[in-house]
Amino acid sequence: MDHAITAEELAEKIKEISIAEFFEKNRHLLGYENPTKSLLTVVKEAVDNSLDAALEARILPTVKVWVKEAGQNRYKVKVEDNGPGLKPSKVPVAFGKFLVGSKFAYLKQLIGTQGIGIKGVVLYAQLTTGKPTKIITKTKKEVHEFELMIDVIKNEPIIVSHKKEKNESGKTGLTIETEVEGRYVEGQQSILNYLKLISIANPYAEIIFNSPRGKHVFKRATKKLPPLPREIKPHPYGVEIGKLKRMIMLTKHKDMVSFLTKEFSSVGKGSAIKICKLARIDPKTNPKNLTHKEIEKLHQAMNKVKLKAPPTNCLSPIDEESLLNGIKKEFPAQFYSVAVRKPTVYRGYPFQVEVALAYGEPLKNEQAMLLRFANHTPLLYNAGECAITKAATKINWRNYGLSQSSNSLPNAPLVILVDVISVWIPYTSEGKQAIASYPEIEKEITLALQEAGRKLGRFVSKMKRLHQLKVRKNIFQAYSTVFAEYLAKITKKSEDYIKKKVEEILNKGEVEESKEVKKEKQEVVEV
């Protein structure tokens, strides 16, 4: 008979694991699911960091990427930027300790927000090749070179080496060099396509890619940086009771009115008193003295009192002209349509939707191509799970003159770009490749697509009328000799005179219709 396990023996088997050890065993959660996606993820995390740093420093970014074969299924990856660099003392923790970073606690729009991304690169490198990752930070006075690994048991950085020297050039920036297991491909889910797409949604960036198959340069389409996002405080509607309890535990304010007005956005003195009255709490009460039941009542009251929406200066939208320039440089087409929605809110978090459409020749795709973005970075995987895909396939594109099967993208030479920006993107997983289907987000995507679609519909309608006019003209021209001969007998006019007049009428209609099409194009270009 098997020995029964005692409670003491069971307890001996329970052990605490670090977050680094967890991700070591579950690296697919960070996007390292297969060699192709893993190599892309390494480049993506480094480029995203470079763009965030440049934007915060108000520098027009130039990001250089090298991917070089280093053996069978092995690649050396190097990403270099011209940003402000990183303080040397912060490098080990920023690259070698999970859930530590400058972005996690901020309520402002950034590409990286979880304190995870770039550490995953270091961890993936040591898992697959056993080699440390090199980080070179250039500040104005010094150049520091680190080689780092991660102690997965302690979730602490291991500094393999550290060198420093004077910065003779005075140029700043950060360089990451690593060797990883991977597979390089070109196509829709590739590094090349990712860099092409991120250059569209970040048109102020110049990206130079030295791939195993050649050099690619994605030039900046504008020198205009988007607005710098500002940090905001949490809005009462987006705070869950657990977070509220933690905020109360950590607050330095001694009364409820100060706590509510200083720790939250969109709460004035009058609103704070209303919340307290509804929760039956004395406004002079010290928050730390609240019981669990009183905190529950406070949480309910916070969600019942009507409050202003949170400020939206925490977002950094691309203006319509820059977005138009971004998509035009990579997708030459006959017609472009752009729609940027006003900011709105889900669960107390501000967000905004930007849409751009490119249509017609010289686009060659027979079915529409959907480009999904979150905070100006492309989403290349898990399209079926994404709110953007669900909204785009629910649109009735037939209303805009395009053919479409049910619940699908239209059958047309069309590129659909959708970018959702927010202080907190609700990704479906830590891999950050799909946006969860919140009704508020899907609704805004739908409205933005419909707005851009109406502009496209007017253009398509005019193009169809122009085509019909040309067909009619060709028919008339085919029978013009017979028609002129017959009409000449009735009117006693010469055949040449009648032919000339018919040609003038046909040309006049075509010219007027062509002017309407050009006008439609011009109205969209001058957004």
Image (cartoon, helix red, strand yellow):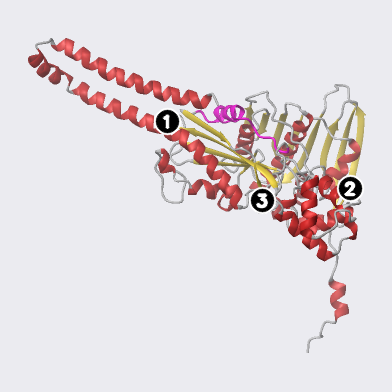
Element carrying mark 3:
loop
Q: Is 92 left, or right, of 521 in this rendering? A: right
**Relative height, residue 186 to residue 494 (above, below):** below
Cα separation between marks 1 and 3? 35 Å
User: In this orientation, which residue lies closer to the viewer: 41 or 398?
Assistant: 398
Q: Which residue occupies 70% across, 50% down? A: 306
Was residue 523 drawn as part of the magenta stretch in this picture?
Answer: no
> Which kind of residue does numbered mark 3 sit on?
Tyr
Where residue 111 sits: x, y (%)?
71, 41
- Which residue is disc 2 drawn over? 158
Are there few (<14), some (14-19), or many (20+) residues within 10 Å of tag 1? many
Where residue 429 sits: x, y (%)?
67, 54
- Which residue is disc 1 drawn over? 459
Q: Is 269 left, or right, of 224 in this rendering? A: right
Q: Nearer the viewer, mark 2 or mark 1?
A: 1
Cα separation between marks 2 and 1? 60 Å
**Furthest residue toward left:** 489
Q: Nearer the viewer, mark 1 or mark 3?
A: 1
Q: Is 151 left, or right, of 518 in this rendering? A: right
Q: Find the magenta span and give its range.
A: 314-332
Identify the mark nearer the N-term, 2 or 1.
2
Q: Which mark is residue 427?
A: 3
Cα separation between marks 3 and 2? 31 Å
> Which kind of residue does numbered mark 1 sit on?
Phe
Are there few (<14), some (14-19), or many (20+) residues within 10 Å of tag 3? some
**Relative height, residue 454 to residue 492 (above, below):** below
Q: Nearer the viewer, mark 3 or mark 2?
A: 3
